[in-house]
Amino acid sequence: MSSKFYRRGAPHKWGAGFCYEPGGLKKVYAEFYGLRELPFALTPDPRFIYFTPSHTEVMANLHYGIESGKGLIVVTGEVGTGKTTILRWMMQRLDRTVLVAYIFNPRLSVSEFYQHIATLLEVQKWETKSELLMELGRCLESRHARGLRTVLIIDEAQGLSPHVLEEIRLLSNFESDNAKQLQIVLTGQPELREVLNNPDLRQLKQRIALRCAIKALPSIEETERYITSRLLVAGAQRTDMFSPDAIAYIYRCSDGIPRSINNLCDNALLAGYAAGEMVIGAETIEEVAETFDMLPRSDQGKKVAERPETPARIFTPAGRSDLWKAASPPDSDTDSEEPVPVEQEQ
């Protein structure tokens, strides 16, 4: 029997009164909202990629850099902006003539780093680092002569040790008279820029041919388009599952970071399913954001529906009258009403 969540009794708050059979959590709310699959999973599924102008610029740089044999390309972006997703999207669409070595765990020693490269690039018959480099050089030269490209992609590169980064610099020396034989792509968090600014790595920094950055979604409107895009990929027949106020609050809580948006939307739909809500409102987003410590700092301890009180007057009516009389010229009509402040022309 397939596993499901069953709601008991009347609609209730998120997480209350569930009976769960193991194995059905993934599809817990999909049927309720008419979805084929979960639209806001946190895994970097390339099918759900949403191209902002920032993503398009990064992809253009990667395409140009690899095709033109530029050598070293650096892509940075805040946590959760989609760096890994865009890499996987690109790798799925590379021609068969492109051989890719993708390293996603940067916490490697120099020897482990070379073992990874040898395995991924199918370099055989070596025992020492010197033999490996000679075999790698022959492999790269042969592929380059046949018009084939070889790409080394290292994700989370801000975690690379200075020793491994120095080896990457040496690998960038594999080149012909007019092009690099090994294209190297380093992607990482903004801290990668600080790492590369280390004076000891200035030779590596000078070899960077292209730099680009993935940015967060810039506006509420872009956030709405992002949410709509993922819902459609997941098979949604309608895309109004989140109210305009909810989308605006999602943007505020997430700062436009796609992974944070996914987390909020996924859990909000689960909460909406629990409460029997077909449209998610801002209050549901607030509940989820509070649970995950994602409330905007200005909203800490304040309900989303609350409105700030009108500031109290600092003078009593009699005090305002006295102030106006004191500020009026002697020949003015002191019984006139208080003046209404207007913006003065410059």
Image (spheres, helix red, strand yellow):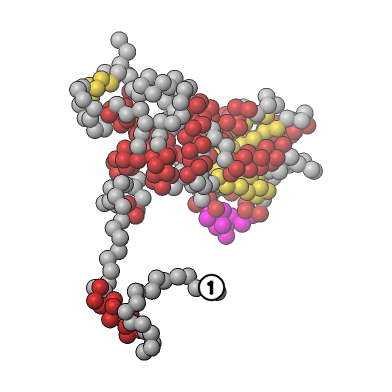
Front position in the image: 283 or 213: 283
Q: Is residue 196 magenta?
A: yes
For residue 301, above or below residue 16: below
Front position in the image: 1 or 217: 217
Residue at screen point 64% across, 35% down: 151
Residue at screen point 21% across, 22% down: 8
Task: Look at the image and tell me whether residue 283 can be seen.
Answer: yes
Q: Main secondary structure of the magenta part?
A: helix
Q: Is residue 317 magenta?
A: no
Q: In the rendering, at what x and y percent does residue 107 appear?
A: 47, 41
For residue 15, above or below residue 22: below
Residue named by callout 1 = 345
Q: In the rendering, at what x and y percent does residue 261 appear?
A: 43, 39
Q: Amino acid at mark 1?
A: Glu
Q: In the rendering, at what x and y percent does residue 6 appear?
A: 25, 20
Quarter of the rendering occupied by the C terminus: bottom right
- Residue farthest along the bottom direction in this orientation: 330
Q: In the rendered image, which quarter is residue 29 located in?
A: top left
Task: Look at the image and tell me whether residue 113 can be seen.
Answer: no
For residue 94, above or below residue 199: above
Q: In the rendering, at what x and y percent does residue 264 appear?
A: 38, 38
Residue at screen point 50% across, 26% down: 232
Quarter of the rendering occupied by the N terminus: top left
Q: Which residues are magenta?
A: 194-203
Q: Is residue 111 left or right of residue 149?
A: left
Residue at screen point 54% across, 35% down: 50
Characterize the local packing of mark 1: few (<14), some (14-19) or many (20 or more) Cα atoms within 10 angstroms. Answer: few
Q: In the rendered image, which quarter is residue 327 located in?
A: bottom left
For mark 1, give the secondary structure. loop
